[in-house]
Amino acid sequence: MAKAAEKVPGWVARILLPEIRAIVKEEVASEAKRLDEKMDLLRNELLSEIKRVDERLGGEIKRVDERLGAEIKRVDEKLSAEIKRVEAELRGMDEKLTAKIDGLERALSLASRLAVLEAEVKELREKLSGKVP
């Protein structure tokens, strides 16, 4: 800029350059203000859009949460009913097994008594066969 100023006649440098600088400074300030206003507008639009998206997502999250809560409750009720059914079935099986075990114990007792009787019969036969030649 210094070399350019050397080529400019003195009267231009004294009169026009300060005026040009003032005009440029005013134009730059005006453009800066316009850009600031535009950035403020864009920032406000962006904040509005973020708020709108946030509200929409909040609503969606609430709906999903409600659906999940209902689904979890439904599954919990179904599992509770199934657990009760299985418990009842197990009680029934336990009663049947207890009855069968009781029957087996009686049969085992009878088999044991039968074995004793068979041994006694065998012993008596041996005694009888020994006495009767």
Image (cartoon, rainbow, N blue to C red):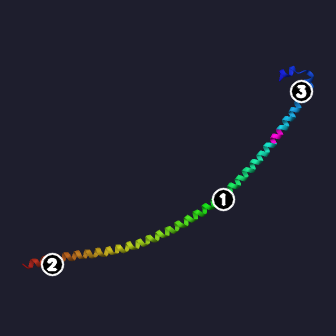
The reply, left or right, for residue 36 in relation to residue 116 is right
> What amino acid is labelled 1 in the image?
Lys
Dominant SS in magenta: helix
Q: Residue at x 81, y 41 (%)?
A: 36
Front one among 126 and 11: 11
Q: Is residue 10 above or below residue 61?
A: above
Tell me the crowding category of disc 2: few under 14, some 14 to 19, or many 20 or more residues within 10 angstroms, Cα based. Answer: few
Name the residue tied to disc 3.
17
Residue 48 belongs to magenta span:
no
Q: In the structure shown, which secondary structural element does the residue marked by tag 2 occupy? A: helix
Indicate the position of residue 9 as horizontal and vertical percent values: 90, 21
Q: Earlier in the sequence, mark 3 or mark 1?
A: 3
Q: Is residue 37 above or below residue 19?
A: below
Q: Earlier in the sequence, mark 2 or mark 1?
A: 1
Please provide the residue range marked out in magenta. Answer: 32-36
Front one among 99 and 6: 6
> What amino acid is labelled 2 in the image?
Leu
Name the residue tied to disc 1.
62
Q: In the structure shown, which secondary structural element does the residue marked by tag 1 occupy? A: helix
Q: Which mark's residue is nearer the viewer, 3 or 2?
A: 3
- State the CA–CA distance, disc 3 to disc 1: 66 Å
Where's the C terminus, which quadrant? bottom left
Q: Residue at x 79, y 46 (%)?
A: 41
> What amino acid is labelled 3 in the image?
Leu
- State the CA–CA distance, disc 3 to disc 2: 150 Å
Indicate the position of residue 109 as horizontal and vertical percent values: 28, 75
The reply, left or right, for residue 87 in relation to residue 44 is left
Indicate the position of residue 42 as horizontal and vertical percent values: 77, 45
The image's mark for residue 124 is: 2
Q: Earlier in the sequence, mark 3 or mark 2?
A: 3
